[in-house]
Image (cartoon, rainbow, N blue to C red):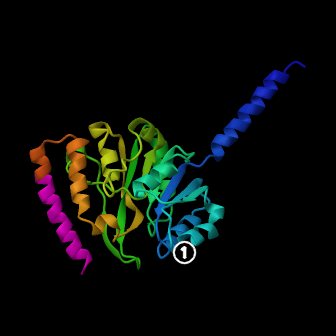
């Protein structure tokens, strides 16, 4: 019958538009290992934001505590989950990345939480900056009991960023197309793999900065406790950013001093 072909095409287009509109805007990835004490707080935070179109993926490293049980109790809000031994947090993130369906990717640690309406603020920045590789906001560094220690974050400026991690990472949004362009995380890093990934584009990285805190990050994680973060940061600067050795040595001294001061403050 005349017009049937047009009607069929129009119906398909409407269905495709509905699929696109219903697709999650951001994929939130959590890597866990024996995180039963902290994970419920993060899941409760995300559940309170269930009206926002996100998908949650959890890669567990083979926990032996109640972590897996907690995850299974919240399976109604989890799009993908797997528990098996891994090579560390970046290996876990890479595994989850293969199952994301959103144009934007974010990473939370167990215990980390978003501020109210944080996802909406990230999404607004994403709509205004569709070519961005990374959307960064400030964060509150907090103790496990929720007490705020300090606010952290700054605009991305290559001349400063190449010398140290000046911006935050927890909860921030990465364009999925940036992973397609620059690759997954390097699993030879155990602590500074996020910094190394952000260095790959050098001064061409397209960063949008939101100058307000949108995430609460629990201090005391592996990067807070481990001096290896200093050595890994220098390795990333030398091999990925390709900075001169004399500058990397200078950065090592400054980073070591910062780490010692940080450890002293957090242990008080």
Direction front: furthest residue: 85
- Dot 1 crowding, Cα within 10 Å, few <14, some 14–19, many 20+: few
Q: Quadrant of the C terminus?
A: bottom left
Question: Residue 97 location in percent, x, y?
Answer: 50, 48
Q: Left or right of 237: which side holds 51?
A: right
Direction right: furthest residue: 1
Q: Left or right of 183: which side holds 77?
A: right
Q: Is residue 106 visible?
A: yes
**Mark 1 sits on what residue?**
66
Question: Residue 160 location in percent, x, y?
Answer: 21, 49
Element at label 1: loop
Check if residue 181 falls in the magenta segment: no
Q: Quadrant of the N terminus?
A: top right
Q: Viewer-proximal residue, 162 or 53?
A: 162
* Residue positioned 30% across, 48% down in the render: 196
Q: Viewer-proximal residue, 170 or 233?
A: 233
Position of 35 relative to 60 (above/below): below
Magenta region, residue range: 250-268
- The part of the image, by quadrant, that contains residue 141 is bottom left
Question: Residue 39 location in percent, x, y?
Answer: 50, 70
Q: Viewer-proximal residue, 120 or 44?
A: 44
Q: Viewer-proximal residue, 199 or 84?
A: 84
Q: Is residue 161 visible?
A: no
* Residue positioned 22% across, 58% down in the render: 230
Direction top: furthest residue: 2
* Residue positioned 41% across, 76% down in the render: 146
- The part of the image, by quadrant, that contains residue 52 is bottom right
SS assignment for the magenta stretch, majority:
helix
Question: Residue 120 location in percent, x, y?
Answer: 51, 55
* Residue positioned 54% across, 75% down in the render: 66
Check if residue 256 falls in the magenta segment: yes
């Amino acid at each position: 019958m005349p017009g049937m072909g047009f009607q069929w095409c129009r119906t398909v287009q409407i269905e495709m538009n509905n699929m696109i509109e219903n697709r999650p805007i951001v994929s939130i990835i959590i890597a866990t290992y024996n995180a039963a004490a902290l994970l419920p707080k993060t899941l409760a935070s995300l559940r309170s934001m269930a009206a926002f179109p996100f998908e949650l993926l959890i890669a567990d490293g083979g926990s032996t505590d109640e972590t897996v049980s907690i995850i299974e109790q919240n399976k109604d809000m989890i799009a993908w989950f797997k528990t098996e031994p891994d090579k560390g947090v970046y290996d876990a993130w890479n595994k989850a990345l293969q199952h994301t369906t959103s144009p934007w990717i974010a990473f939370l640690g167990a215990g980390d939480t978003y501020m109210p309406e944080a996802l909406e603020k990230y999404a607004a920045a994403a709509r205004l900056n569709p070519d961005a590789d990374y959307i960064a906001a400030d964060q509150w560094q907090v103790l496990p009991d929720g007490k705020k220690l300090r606010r952290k974050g700054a605009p991305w400026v290559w001349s400063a960023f190449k010398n140290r991690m000046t911006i935050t990472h927890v909860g921030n949004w990465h364009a999925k197309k940036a992973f397609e362009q620059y690759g997954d995380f390097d699993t030879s890093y155990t602590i500074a793999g996020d910094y190394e990934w952000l260095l790959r584009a050098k001064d061409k990285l397209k960063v949008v900065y939101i100058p307000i805190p949108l995430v609460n990050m629990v201090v005391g994680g592996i990067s807070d406790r481990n001096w290896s973060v200093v050595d890994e940061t220098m390795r990333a600067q030398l091999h990925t950013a390709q900075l001169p050795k004399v500058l990397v040595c200078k950065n090592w001294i400054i980073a070591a001093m910062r780490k010692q001061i940080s450890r002293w403050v957090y242990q008080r």
